[in-house]
Image (tube, coloured by chain):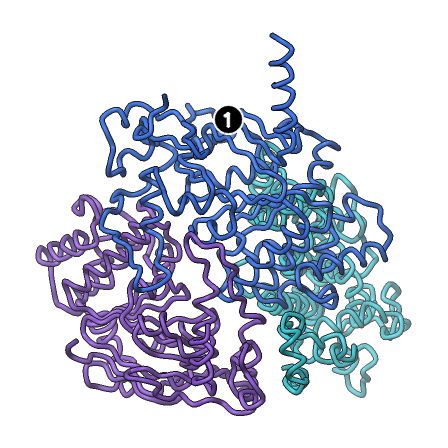
Chain colours: A purple, B cyan, C blue
Amino acid sequence: MTREILKVKDLATHYTGFGGSRVVKAVDEVSFSLEEGQTIGIVGESGCGKTTLCLSLVRLLAPGAQIVGGSIELNGRDILKLSQKEMVEVRGKEIAMILQDPMTSLNPVINIETQVGEAAFKHRGLRSSTLRERVRQLLEAVRIPSPDVRMQEFPHQMSGGMRQRIAGAVALSGEPGIIIADEPTTSLDVTIQAQYLDLLRRLQKDTGVGLIFVTHDLGIVAKMCDDVIVMYAGKTVEKGSVREIFNNPNHPYTSALIRSVPKLGSKDPLYRIEGQPPDLSNLPQGCSFASRCAIADDHCFEHEPPLIEVGPRRLAACWKIEENAASKEQA
Amino acid sequence: MNVPDSNNSTKMPRKASRKGALEEASSGEIRNANKDSRSKVRAFLDFVKQLPVGSTLILGILVFFAICAPLLAPHDPIRPVEGIYTYTPAAWKDGGSWAQWLGTDFLGRDVWSRIIYGARVSVIVGLTGTAAAGAIGMVMGVVAGYFGGWVDAFIMRVVDAWLAIPTLVLAILLSMTLGASMWNIVLILGVVYWTRYARILRGEVLTLRERDFVKLAEVAGAGRIRIITRHIIPNVFNTWMVLASLTVGVVIVAEASLSFLGVGVPAPQPAWGSMLNDARAQLLTGRWWLMAAPAVAIGLTVLGANLFGDWLRVKLDPQQRNL
Amino acid sequence: MSDASHEQIAQAETLKNAKTLVVNDLVKHFPAGRSGFGVKANKQWVKAVDGVSFDIAPGETLGLVGESGCGKSTIAKLILRLEDPTSGSIKFEGREITDLKGDQLKDYRRSVQAVFQDPYSSLSPRMRVHDIVAEGLRIHTDYSKSDVRTRVNDVLALAGLSPDVGRLYPHEFSGGQRQRIAIAKALVLDTKMLILDEAVSALDVSIRAQIITLLKDLQQELGIAYLYIGHDLATVGHLSDRVMVMYLGRVLELDDSIELVRNPKHPYTEALFAAALPSNPDHIGDTSEQPNAEVPTALAPPTGCHFHPRCQQSMEHCSTHFPQEVKLTGGRRISCHLYPGD
């Protein structure tokens, strides 16, 4: 691995509502870093703060949400110190996004050429024939057949898979160092999803772009990511390399998640995590996973576990790491 | 909002709560579970507190006038005030009083009393006319949207045709054929203004019909009547309410226009529209206040109704589609 | 015909009757595009379902996988009689249901229920949970108020909910809880078959496991037949006894779910499984042999075998002839020219 391009440290994003009487800690002291050509996965269930996290990274938070602490160092400078005007220069040029729904992330009344070329025009100063050539390259890169014809067309003339690939081309247009992909394949069919993920990998290999995958799907993480951050109730509960996380999870939530996913060709009963994720505006005292945890004891309900180093490049926040490891060895 | 409740749940005996995790989840996850326990009075006060001040005040006074007119009006609105044959408000005269502070009209009737009584017509016609239009529009819109096909095509063509006729012309025509009376006016306004409901509700029903719960009702064996009354109408009711609140103002103006033109509420019943008409001749002689009084009354009422409608739209329709 | 063959036929009939659902050569064509007011343009037809046959036994789960546009949701609608088939037959407990009307149709609706994908769309937002669940009882029975209450509380308990939830509105629940309510609603009558159209797809991972387990437990307890429709192979395989793979309105392969996963034979099934996401980073399959092209639309399906333009092993006659379905030893049904009949 090479150059570190993104370093997020103790990032905290809170929502305040109801006249400031309630604070929702959607992202609570999350840290990670991303190197060139690396893929990091942010996994968690809905409401765990993963989408807020990625919106914080580009500072496109909804009104009411505020980054209240930490730093986001992008290519060596803290983007939290930039003005919104300066952020416009950063978005698309240094960091780009691919969103879940290609139907809404593309503008229905602007043709493909203009949409794909926008960032190249704005950030890379490409004009007329060079710009068109660049758009053609991008469309070819995302495997759009007959790009010359397609670039004159509009989003509604494309299939879902094609639209999502075009959203990929739009993200690549400004030659960013980082692409954040927020559930980019949820609306795609299985075979199209596999194609798209392979395409992203190939593009990553060619351009060295750093990928941040935000997803609830462990399969995507297993397939795509180098490192994984598991989030629960706004906090990092576990962090490590993808192989480590899958083969030797330290946090009971991670291991429960992995065991609760049906596996192809197996009918073994699934592990059930009982209950619901907690309400972020009203977190219980102690470990927020305790009420759903099979091994929690009174200590867990009273004290919040810190995120501690449990191995080389491995972090976990659980009081029961040793116990958990021991029980796994028994099993 | 319900912080006390959730605090309780975290203080529950932990072992027990973990064992019955599922049960706990199903009751613990439910938001606002203690809504019912909150006293009804508190809920009502909360409701009142969030009402828009201006429009509620205007409409409140209007309804108060309408209901309590006999108690509030200092004079009989139909008979001339004894011994006074002047247009000018008494207060303006030397040593005058507040007895007829808005003056008297060309027959010597107290204008203030007529304004108060006129509120009755505006309130009754405004509400029932809107309701009549809403009822026709609801039936037409729901039938068109739910049944689709040629029924839909037919109703929508009728709506198109209806919209091509100037509403006031249609109203005048109907009024002249049916004869002028307050309840005829209500009926006429219903027939004139149903199309705005029908069009929008049809659209709502078209999307509702595709929602899974409507399909599931069909799968459960529910008949058409049940689906329409239990599943469709309750779900378009908010839209209906918003439409109604935005129609009230229009209907009040329409009634005033008809009365002004002499095809509305028949004399001598006091209505703001006909008061405007009565005052027309006096305007030439400079007695502007006779015209101003009903005009201000109509203006304020419509303003109040529209402000209230806007507030209701924002409240009931979070997506703020431009109804 | 001899007596013996008569007997055989009769036996076959009873065997068939033992099935909860028998679908035979089901066809549904939709007119493409809109026909205007009284204007009949020359119509194009979308062959959403094009000659599909399968059966489901009591207590069995048949999984139905395929990509969008393969006709799987149309099949659900046909069985639920939300759409009428163009041709073919659907027999429920031996009785043809495609031409049921009025009271007979209403009677059929007592036994076949559905749970759909989106828990936010499947519960009427303006009805209390109790009324949502009780609706079937109010339509089909003349239970007294207290009987309705008892039954509703029973099925809520079956779905893992406490009776208190009855007085609340759907918006007060999370997605997983809503799906439990939908399941309770589907079980309130004497349900014999449940159509589960992507019933867990919209749920979070941990909630999904809860609902899958609930569905399995309920099936064991009540002996209901399931038709589980999904795009996620792992979930479909996990829930189903047998899995049927569809592509553009036709069945390409059908077998026992474990068998099918271990040994997919049809190139499309192979491609589907190859495209499935790994459950562990150590098992990243080789996805280089992906079918490249997009899924064609059902409006203009390719000639011959619909899959041939995307098939790695397509042969000359694949583009001209649709392969006949054959039954391999072990009972697998497949239609592919790689597996010709006798």
Dividing the picture into quadrants, the one containing residue A217 is: bottom left
The residue tagged with tag 1: helix, strand or loop? strand
Dividing the picture into quadrants, the one containing residue C169 is: bottom right
Q: Which residue is drawn at the image coordinates 75% and 39% (left, top)?
A: B177
Residue C311 shown left or right of residue C194 in the figure: left
Q: Look at the image and tell me whether residue B280 can be seen.
A: yes
- Say which of A290 and B298 sits in front: A290
Label 1 crowd bin: few (<14), some (14–19), many (20+), radius 10 Å: some
**Which residue is disc 1 drawn over?**
C25
Q: Mark 1 lies on which chain?
A: C
Classify A265 as above or below B38. above
Quadrant of the image for the N terminus of chain C? top right
Q: Which residue is drawn at the image coordinates 53% and 80% (left, top)?
A: A295
Q: Look at the image and tell me whether residue C33 can be seen.
A: no
Dividing the picture into quadrants, the one containing residue C44 is: top left
Quadrant of the image for the C terminus of chain C? top left
Amino acid under disc 1: Asp
Furthest residue to the right? B82
Residue A91: image x %, image y %?
25, 73
Classify B165 as above or below B17. above
Furthest residue to the left? A130
Residue C170: image x %, image y %?
64, 63
Residue C52: image x %, image y %?
48, 31
Furthest residue to the front? A330
- Say which of A325 and B46 sits in front: A325
- Say which of B259 and B167 sits in front: B167
Residue B247: image x %, image y %?
65, 57
Q: Which residue is drawn at the image coordinates 44% and 81% (left, top)?
A: A326
